[in-house]
Image (tube, helix red, strand yellow):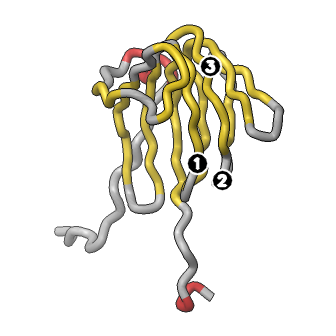
Amino acid sequence: MTAPIENAVPAPVGIDDHDARDLPLTPTGSPQVVVSGDPRTAEHVLHESPEVEVGVWEVTPGVFDSRKAGCSEIMHFLSGEGRLDHADGTHSDIRPGVTVILPEGWTGRWTVTSTVRKIYTICRVTAATPEDA
């Protein structure tokens, strides 16, 4: 008889693009700084820990400002169209198949022209402690 493994890590989570496109989401409200329109958000969190959150997120058309404070984010767009205007004057198109990385400290504006759905990974910034050195 095999004894259970103490302190086992959580089971891996996997999802493909097709399943993520059809995954039911829970409404979460609106972005904090809406510029125009009435964008509404919804999400399904697949994994969450103090350091990382992974899930599927959706937003309806509208324009809103956003910033990454205390975290960075990797986004892979599954559907929809729009544009991310970055504070440095550059932009990223939003369309299926595009992956965008927003570093900690990023600020910019989302312009969503058709409902956008993405798979995301948020990596939270944690302060180093003397034990980490």
Mark 3 or mark 2, which is nearer the start of the sequence? Answer: 2
Instruction: State if disc 3 and disc 1 touch (CB < 8 Å).
Output: no
Residue identifier under label 3: 111
CA gap between label 2 and label 3 equals 19 Å
Instruction: State if disc 2 and disc 1 touch (CB < 8 Å).
Output: yes
- 58 relative position to 107: left or right: left
Q: Residue at x 60, y 51 (%)?
A: 72
Residue identifier under label 2: 105
Bin the neighbour count of mark 1 within 10 Å (Cα to Cα): few under 14, some 14-19, many 20 and up.
Answer: some
Mark 3 or mark 1, which is nearer the start of the sequence? Answer: 1
| Residue closest to the far left | 1
Q: Position of residue 62 (x, y in %)?
A: 52, 16
Residue identifier under label 1: 68
Q: Position of residue 54 (x, y in %)?
A: 45, 43
Residue 87 drawn above or below residue 76: below
| Residue closest to the far top | 114
Which of the 4 image quadrants contains residue 39? Answer: top left
